[in-house]
Image: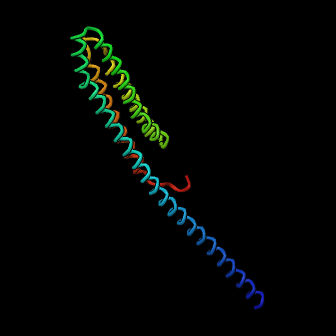
């Protein structure tokens, strides 16, 4: 019987060793996945920060350009007062072209950020796009007439743009502070 007991004991020791090996392999593998996820998340964060920073610079420059569009055409208005009609037409054409180009300069970086996600940032980008569209429209309201600029429409659009920017900052901070979750 001692030979049988020795065989059973050896089998039990081998089985225990195999189980310990499997469990330690699982633990080590899980740790590697967690480490890999942390490294990849860090790389993703650097990329996100860079994209968000590029976008915010383009957004702020666009908001500034919309403001410049309101300040800039006073020479055109003065010309309209002197020449009756031609200056207003030139002012309107100028505002339409410049406001379109300003919105386009903001739209490309906005689309890049939208492609990156997550959903909360996408929603914030949708609000930013609506705000930029409202600014473009507000700058154009009453253009080509002596009633331009419509400061009420411009003020409302600017407030909308500021609120959308704050919403974007909140969503982007939350997205960048969310840790990775391996297995999801």
Q: Tell me where residue 73 sits by quadrant.
A: top left
Q: How many numbered discs, if any?
A: 0
**Way the structure is coloured:** rainbow
Residue 3 image-quadrant placement: bottom right
**Residue depicted at 50% across the width and 54% down the height:** 181
> Residue at the spot x=24%, y=11% of the render?
146
Asked whether, in this view, residue 70 is left or right of residue 108, the answer is left
Q: Residue at x 53, y 66 (%)?
A: 31
Query: Residue 111: horizontal and vertical position, in percent?
Result: 46, 37
Q: Is residue 93 above or below residue 176?
A: above
Q: Residue furthest bottom?
A: 2
Q: Residue at x 69, y 77 (%)?
A: 15
**Viewer-closest of 133 and 4:** 133
Q: Where 41 sits versus 171, above or below?
A: below
Q: Position of residue 51 (x, y in %)?
A: 42, 46
Most distant residue in the top direction: 84
Q: Residue 58: horizontal and vertical position, in percent?
A: 36, 39
The image quarter in which residue 1 lies: bottom right
């Amino acid at each position: 019987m001692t030979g049988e007991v020795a065989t059973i004991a050896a089998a039990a020791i081998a089985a225990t060793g195999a189980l310990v090996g499997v469990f330690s392999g699982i633990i080590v593998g899980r740790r590697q996945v967690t480490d890999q996820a942390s490294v990849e998340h860090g790389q993703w964060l650097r990329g996100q920060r860079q994209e968000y920073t590029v976008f915010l610079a383009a957004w702020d420059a666009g908001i500034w350009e919309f403001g410049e569009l309101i300040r800039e055409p006073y020479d055109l208005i003065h010309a309209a007062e002197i020449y009756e009609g031609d200056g207003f037409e030139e002012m309107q054409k100028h505002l339409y072209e410049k406001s379109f180009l300003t919105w386009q300069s903001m739209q490309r970086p906005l689309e890049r950020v939208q492609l990156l996600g997550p959903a909360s940032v996408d929603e914030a980008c949708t609000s930013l796009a609506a705000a930029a569209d409202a600014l473009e429209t507000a700058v154009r309201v009453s253009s080509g007439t002596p009633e331009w600029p419509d400061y009420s429409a411009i003020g409302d659009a600017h407030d909308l743009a500021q609120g959308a920017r704050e919403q974007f900052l909140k969503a982007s901070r939350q997205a960048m502070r969310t840790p990775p979750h391996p297995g999801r």
